[in-house]
Image (cartoon, rainbow, N blue to C red):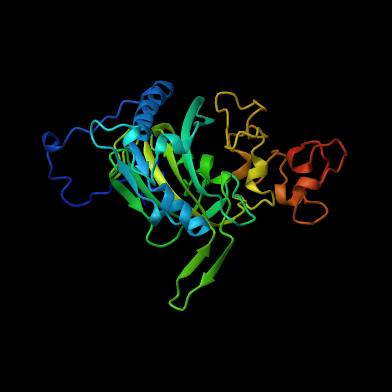
Amino acid sequence: MNLRKVSLYLLCLTVGVLSCKKDDEPDPVVIEIRDRAEQQIEDMVSLNAYLDTHYYNSEEIESLGTSVSISDIVIYELAEGQTAADVPVGHTLLRTAVGAPKTTTYADTDYEFYVLSLNQGGGTQSPKFCDRIRFNYEGFTLDDVVFDYSVNPFVSNLIGNGVDDFGLIIGWSKVIPDFNTAESFVENSDGTVSYVNKGVGIMFLPSGLAYFSSATTGIAAYSPIIFKFELLQMSENDHDGDGVPSYLEDLNGDRGFLVNYDDLTDTTDDDTDGDGTPDYIDLDDDGDGILTIDEDINKDGDPTNDDSNGNGIPNYLDKTDKIKKS
């Protein structure tokens, strides 16, 4: 799936390799790693140009109300020489529809991006930035070329464990928490499921919140991209199974899992014991030799409310809690 951010491809060619001469081997493609801040400026120029020259079927979408789906959304491009005044009746220029850009910080870079909210979603749940979601999507480039889409609802972690699951590109974790899941669902006689009043929108992402320097099928390196999406369901994640929901292990509240590898004594990141493993995938968050799950002394399945020495720090983050290792 293009949606999965892959950090390493391993190509195992066992037939014919030894017979190839080095002169026959193509030179590897080297992608220059660009400055993120400079690339963001360039990407925003491209995104703004897209918003200024494209419009969508807003009247039809509004008439559908809470039953809208991404298949109903149609985006058109203005013809050369046309302006916003030429947008047909019943349609709205994307520039007008999206409003001001959203802002976030990622990889020490300030980012702007756009979101068009078409239906909030009628469910009572909104995913946290690191939860697991069920959703539909369609991804396309600024040339309006679709590079990926879901045939059936897709399930993924917004943020994976960084080892065998890299989750989705970072932009999803910045957008999806602002939407609600579907209000309900109906199991149809043909085995399919219909979702009622689901969260629906479009995200317009700079490359720094997408694939950045990593080219993937249908997407060149440093490409801003767009996703239509439907948020259907969610489940709360506890990546390391230590009894603490992953979102609570975002200690600095930046909606990400930061480790300062240059200074493992830094207490402002998400690595309590400074071992280089962020708490959300660390079975012993405070490094005291006692598993986090075993520091739940009242055995209610929630280590966050156990404070043996009454110093205001829960045991699982406190090396001085005096709990004996069993």
Please determine whether, in this image, residue 279 is positioned above or below residue 297: above
Residue 148 in view (yes/no): yes
Q: Position of residue 227 (x, y in %)?
A: 40, 45
Pick the front one: 73 or 130: 73
Please determine whether, in this image, residue 188 is positioned above or below residue 35: below
- How many discs appear? 0
Pick the front one: 11 or 68: 68
- Using residue 235 as the reference point, say whether residue 78 is left or right of it: left
- Using residue 18 as the reference point, say whether residue 176 is left or right of it: right
Residue at screen point 55% across, 67% down: 185
Pick the front one: 89 or 42: 89
Pick the front one: 25 or 235: 235
Q: Farthest residue in the bottom direction?
A: 189
Examine the image and state in which quarter residue 261 appears: top right
Please determine whether, in this image, residue 39 is positioned above or below residue 198: above
Residue 282 in view (yes/no): no
- Using residue 35 as the reference point, say whether residue 293 is left or right of it: right
Q: Position of residue 91 (x, y in %)?
A: 38, 44
Q: Position of residue 154 (x, y in %)?
A: 45, 58
Examine the image and state in which quarter residue 288 appears: top right
